[in-house]
Image (cartoon, rainbow, N blue to C red):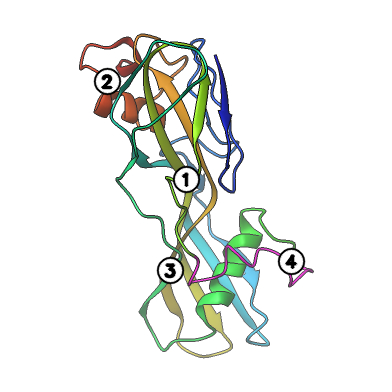
Amino acid sequence: MKIKKTVLSACAVAAVLAGTAACTSDGDGPGVKASAAPTATADTTCKNGAYSWFNVDKRDVLTGVAEKEKVSRKGTRLTHKLATLHTPRTAVTFEQGSRAGNAKAVLRSLAVLIGEADPDDHGVSTEFTNVRRAAPDINNGSTTIDGVGTIVHYAWVEQVTADFRYTCGGGKPVTGRATGWVIDGSGILECSTPIKDAKEGEPALTAARLSCAPDAPAAKP
């Protein structure tokens, strides 16, 4: 089944209903830790400052889902709006010590760590480092599908959360947590079609369990 979305989010995605859940990102799957060991990156706000990162976690998170919708004719435009389940945000929390640097510097260090920014290019990843970044509009645009069945439309983001320790010369270290997201997208599933290789926590599987019947094939891993 083909999908036509007239206005796409920042991540242009498509879904296929032939046994595959749409819109799984290229990042780590749900609950997979991207890094268990501390990694230090330099901070440009302090001559000798550095961030050490721990518990870096990247996962796909369901942000919205619509009620199931019966489609009996090809080329039908979906009409059910998505209800918001999670609103992604960009934030930095300083947990102890005197504050050093700033939130943007923290987020840029994290962006370099996860490969979203080049250490030598200070102009990249401006969205990821923007603490005023607006959450994606999950109902932006319309979606038309080329198939029939009981359809569920959903939205997701690839969220990043990590703990950090900031040191600068002989000053007292600062610890904290940063969170943001690198990808957002949307997808559809068909309730009577199993989601291929679905794992617990995946947005598509969670959406199926919320909107399809409890015994629907799509709701089973």
- Find residue 91 and name its label: 3
- Find residue 212 and name its label: 2
Q: Main secondary structure of the magenta part?
A: loop
State the SS at label 4: loop
From the viewer's side, name the closer residue of 59 and 192.
Answer: 192
Name which residue type carries label 4.
Answer: Pro
Label located before the other in sequence (4 or 3):
3
Would you say the residues marked 4 and 1 are in contact, meaning their CB atoms lie under 8 Å apart?
no
Residue 168 relative to residue 195: left or right: right
Q: Nearer the viewer, mark 1 or mark 2?
A: 2
Q: Position of residue 162 (x, y in %)?
A: 46, 59
> Farthest residue toward the left?
214
Residue numbers of the magenta segment: 120-133
Could you tell me how far apart the alpha carbons at marks 2 and 4 are, in whole angstroms? 45 Å
Q: Nearer the viewer, mark 4 or mark 3?
A: 3
From the viewer's side, name the closer residue of 186 and 167.
Answer: 186
Name which residue type carries label 2.
Answer: Cys
For disc 1, the marked residue is 157
In the picture, the quarter occupied by the N terminus is: top right
Could you tell me how far apart the alpha carbons at marks 4 and 3 are, in whole angstroms? 21 Å
Q: Residues within 10 Å of mark 4 (few under 14, many from 20)?
A: some
> Which residue is rendered at x = 47% and y = 67% of the image?
164
Above/below status of 53 relative to 152: below
For disc 4, the marked residue is 119
Residue 78 relative to residue 171: left or right: left
> Which residue is rendered at x = 57% and y = 62% of the image?
128
